[in-house]
Image (cartoon, rainbow, N blue to C red):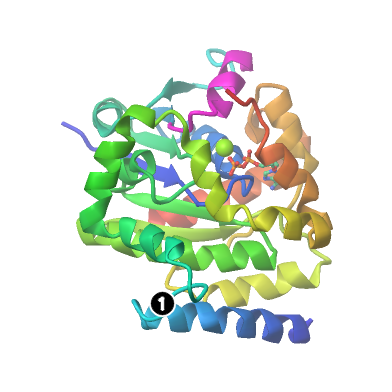
Amino acid sequence: MSKIKDKLKASINPLIAKADAPKAEANVPGQSKPEAQKSSATAGNMQAAAAKAAPTAVEPRVHEKKTAPAKPAKAATGLENKGAYSQGCSVWPD
Amino acid sequence: MSKGIRIALANLKGGCGKSTLALNLAAGLARRGSVRLLDADPQGALRHWSSWADVNEQMPVTVQAADNPGQLASASNECDFVIVDCPPSLDIDITLKFLRNVDHVVVPVLPSPLDLWASNMAAEAIEKVRKENPGLRPWVVLNQLEERSAFSRAMQDVLGQFNLPVLQTRVRRRAIYRLAMLEGKSVYQLGGRGLPAVAEIEAILNEVLQA
Ligand SMILES: Nc1ncnc2c1ncn2[C@@H]1O[C@H](COP(=O)(O)OP(=O)(O)O)[C@@H](O)[C@H]1O
Ligand SMILES: [Mg+2]
């Protein structure tokens, strides 16, 4: 169990380091998309993004693409969460 | 004159328990004062639940669809407590609008590496919002804890590494939370069967309200 804890801790170090070193090579090298997403979440741009998003505010599921990589990985590893995930994402669509 | 206490449930992950906790926290708050539950998630899970629920007799909680802070302001003028169930995103307009105008945000996190990693983004997003709403108090709560899972036990400590306070209270994975939903109730309305879950919800409320 402490092995798991150590591994979990180690797994978040790169995330924390990335947060400490803001602009430099966030995410996958050579991909500009995550950067754009990142900057679109800054306070200044949020307003603009918000104004843009307003007419489509009723379609938030596009944002799930951000967590999309979680899906296959979860199905593969997270037996414990499988039910939660599948239900959580499909409750009363529309 | 306002000021009901405003608590949002938010995370960029779906399925982490925002709606489940929102409705049960609302039910717990209903024992302390008047409550309005704002359903800001276009999926409308809680609106559906409330159409199912025996709201007047058993659940003195009104559920209202909400997509703007004006609704939050009037709810907090009229009620002692307002709970906002946010959509599964932390960087879209609808969530941000609410987070800029609440007193607390409770972030449920599941005991898994994927959810742990996503918590880092949640922490970043909340930090940004706090520049505009410095009074915002964020709280992470571990949900669907499995007593015997090593992950569950390790998560509490590791979650503390991010820039977000973690509630001492942990919510266990209990079928009663789902059953309550199905019956159009909260765990408070299920008698003895609901008591362990009620204790968890009460403990969350005590931690958050005493902060
Ligand atoms: N503590 C818990 N114990 C058991 N099931 C839970 C618990 N919390 C949430 N669930 C279930 O997990 C799924 C996702 O929860 P939900 O509240 O819909 O998450 P979200 O609103 O974040 O998408 C639902 O099926 C819900 O019934
Ligand atoms: Mg929900």
For residue A83, above or below residue B62: below
Q: Which residues are magenta?
A: B40-53
Residue B207 covered by magenta stretch: no
For residue B9, above or below residue B73: below
Q: How many marks?
A: 1
Chain holding disc 1: A
Amino acid type assigned to the residue bearing label 1 in the image:
Ala
Question: Measuring 29% from the left and 57% from the top, which residue is drawn there?
Answer: B129
Residue B114: x and y in percent read 65, 64
Question: How crowded is the residue under tag 1: few (<14 C-alpha within 10 Å), some, or many (20+)?
Answer: some
Quadrant for residue A55, please give it. Answer: top left
For residue B58, above or below residue A54: above
Residue B150: x and y in percent read 79, 73
- Looking at the image, residue A40 sits to the left or right of residue A11; the answer is left
What secondary structure is marked by label 1? helix
Residue B71: x and y in percent read 29, 27
- Residue B5 seen in render: yes
